[in-house]
Amino acid sequence: MTYVIGKECVDVVDKSCVQECPVDCIYEGARTMYINPDECVDCGACKLICRVGAIYWEGDLPDDQQQHLEDNAAFFNQTLPGRDAPLGSPGGAQPIGPIGVDTPMVAAIPVPGA
């Protein structure tokens, strides 16, 4: 089981969760954040601190956000646009920094006001 960042984070990228994560498993895409399911230790600290209510334990994802569970994992196990290989489990987001790209699902979400 893992925690998942849902639609409330898209185009908000609050990052309050990043400072709270004890294992540095929250990575930054272009428009949202992603929790690495292989690195997450299921502590829930990110959920408690998230100011926009975007983080869910996977069993509590609302029905209209179930696609975020698979999409969150896809950020790490699929080759993203402009990258040569999947990100995988690099062991922490801080040394890598922002990835600068999102999964095709997030990238397809209309940008507000555009």
Image (cartoon, rainbow, N blue to C red):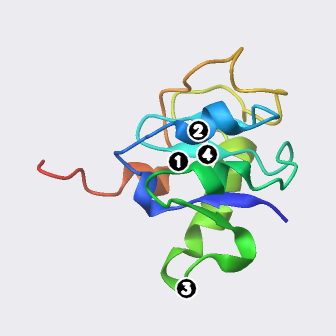
Residue 109 in the image: state x and y as whole percent: 34, 57
Q: Nearer the viewer, residue 80 or 53?
A: 53
Residue where numbered disc 3 is placed: 63
Residue where numbered disc 2 is placed: 80
In the image, which is nearer the foreground, mark 3 or mark 2? Answer: 3
Residue at 79% over, 36% down: 88
Residue where numbered disc 1 is placed: 103
Distance of label 2 from label 1 (alpha carbons): 6 Å
In the image, which is nearer the foreground, mark 1 or mark 3? Answer: 3
Q: Residues within 10 Å of mark 3 (few under 14, many from 20)?
A: few
| Amino acid of disc 1 | Thr
Name which of mark 4 and mark 1 comes first in the sequence.
4
Element class at badge 3: helix
Residue where numbered disc 4 is placed: 34
Do tag 3 and tag 4 residues touch (Cβ < 8 Å)? no
| Amino acid of disc 2 | Leu
Name which of mark 2 and mark 4 comes first in the sequence.
4
Do tag 2 and tag 1 residues touch (Cβ < 8 Å)? yes
Do tag 4 and tag 1 residues touch (Cβ < 8 Å)? yes
Residue at 43% over, 34% down: 30
Residue 11 in the image: state x and y as whole percent: 34, 45
| Amino acid of disc 4 | Tyr
Distance of label 3 from label 4 (alpha carbons): 19 Å
Name which of mark 3 and mark 2 comes first in the sequence.
3
Distance of label 3 from label 2 (alpha carbons): 26 Å
Element class at badge 1: loop
